[in-house]
Amino acid sequence: MRIAVIDYGSGNLASAARGLELAATRLGIAAIVAITDRPDEIAAADRIVLPGQGAFADCAAGLAARPGLADSMHRRVDAGAPFLGICVGMQLMAARGLEHRITPGFGWIAGDIAPMRAEGLRLPHMGWNELHFTPGAHPLLDGLNPGDHAYFVHSYALDRIASPPVIATTDYGGPVAAMVATGNRAGTQFHVEKSQEVGLTILGNFLRWSPA
């Protein structure tokens, strides 16, 4: 299995790659995890992971600045390769980002990435928080229990939490989209690579995931 971790100058690339390698080893999956910005490697990948941190607009600009990178990623995902976006990588799946300015996203899920409303609470939303979901709702949640904790760092979030495509939420001054999935595309608002056993479980599920 060839896994491409997209390198566009943002995100915890090495941590995400190590998490994927560990999850593969635990499951006995022979995997090659490559941190790459090469369109040919992305085109040959069996699975694609897009980490992200920082501002939506900066991450979108970083993708656009690498010749052929975004096009090769979109073509491979359109052809059926499972995709996992992490933090801003998930946010880029939305229609638009509203951080600093209006920035187009991939348009894979409806809604904007808008400032969080968490009256009386500090922003960014930083630290461990519970996941709320219906058991069996999606293969990426297999092996997890409602109330399990994941690690969040963000001040912006998806402004639509209707299900689907939201498959898990958390609460921070109200419900917040924590995981989304549509077709072969999925994302986590939290950092799976920092979420210890919960994160490794999700990464393992992603490696075994066979979207219909």
Image: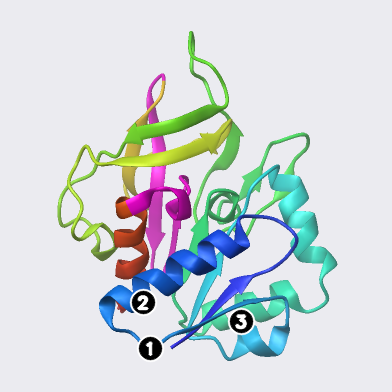
Is residue 122 shown above or below 127? above
Residue 38 image position (x, y, % from top left) = 73, 82
Residue 82 sits inside the magenta stretch: no
Q: Quadrant of residue 171?
A: top left
Q: Which residue is mark 1?
A: 30
Residue displayed at 25% across by 60% down:
138
- In this figure, which colouring scheme has been used for the structure? rainbow
Describe the element under mark 3 as helix, strand or loop. Answer: helix
Q: Is residue 207 visible?
A: no
Give the residues in magenta. 173-196
Residue displayed at 62% across by 83% down:
42
Ranked by sequence position, the earlier of labels 1 and 2 is: 2
Residue displayed at 69% across by 68% down:
7
Look at label 1 and name its amino acid.
Answer: Ala
Instruction: Point out the frontmost of discs 1 and 3.
Output: 1
Describe the element under mark 1 as helix, strand or loop. Answer: loop
Quarter of the N terminus within the rendering: bottom left
Residue 126 image position (x, y, % from top left) = 50, 30
Q: Nearer the viewer, residue 107 or 174?
A: 174
Quarter of the C terminus within the rendering: bottom left
Instruction: Point out the frontmost of discs 3 and 2.
Output: 2
Residue 187 sits inside the magenta stretch: yes
| Alpha-carbon span between mark 3 and mark 2 | 25 Å
Residue 191 image position (x, y, % from top left) = 48, 49
Residue 123 image position (x, y, % from top left) = 57, 22
Sort mark 3 into few (<14), some (14-19) or many (20+) by Cα contacts within 10 Å: few
Sort mark 1 into few (<14), some (14-19) or many (20+) by Cα contacts within 10 Å: few
Q: Quadrant of residue 137?
A: bottom left
How many callouts does the rendering have?
3
Look at label 3 and name its amino acid.
Answer: Arg
Q: Which residue is mark 3?
A: 75
